[in-house]
């Protein structure tokens, strides 16, 4: 295998790093927002309800000729 250049930083990442240096409160805001929407523990009942409400997806929905409609 070849060597991986891990020193590359994209323009977007450079910009984000600069913005985070200028606005250090963003990190705390980001953590608060994540805790609000994603970092929540589920109860057994919630997990079961989510599993029951799952709808089966048709195979490969992007092939418009697959279903013969």
Image (cartoon, grey):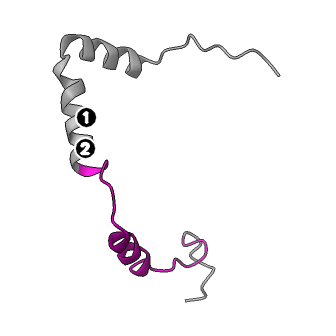
In this view, which residue lies farthest toward the front? 44
Please give the range of residues in magenta: 37-61
Numbered marks: total: 2
State the CA–CA distance, disc 2 to disc 1.
Answer: 6 Å
Q: Measuring from the top left, give residue 68's x and y in whole percent.
A: 61, 88
Looking at the rendered image, the quarter that the C terminus falls into is bottom right
Dividing the picture into quadrants, the one containing residue 55 is bottom left
Q: Residue at horizontal 33%, vertical 71%?
A: 46
Residue at the limit of the structure toward the bottom, as seen here? 69
The residue nearer to you, when weighing 43 against 17, is: 43
Indicate which disc residue 35 carries. 2
Quadrant in the picture for the N terminus: top right
Q: Secondary structure at mark 1?
A: helix
Q: Does the magenta-highlighted stretch encompass residue 49?
A: yes
The residue shown at (20%, 27%) is 28
| Main secondary structure type of the part rendered in magenta | loop
In front here: 50 or 20? 50
- Above or below: residue 60 compared with residue 5: below
Residue drawn at x 18%, y 16% is 23
Q: Secondary structure at mark 2?
A: helix
Viewer-proximal residue, 59 or 48?
Answer: 48
Q: Which residue is mark 1?
A: 31
Q: Residue 3, how many percent across, how many down?
A: 75, 14
Is the residue under label 1 in contact with that under label 2 (CB below 8 Å)?
yes
Image quadrant in which you'd find residue 58: bottom right
């Amino acid at each position: 295998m070849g060597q991986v250049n891990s020193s590359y930083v994209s323009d977007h990442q450079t910009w984000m790093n600069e913005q985070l240096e200028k606005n250090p409160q963003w990190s705390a805001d980001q953590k608060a927002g994540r805790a609000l929407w994603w970092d929540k523990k589920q109860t057994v009942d919630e997990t079961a309800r989510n599993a029951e409400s799952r709808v089966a997806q048709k195979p490969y929905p992007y092939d418009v000729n697959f279903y013969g409609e």
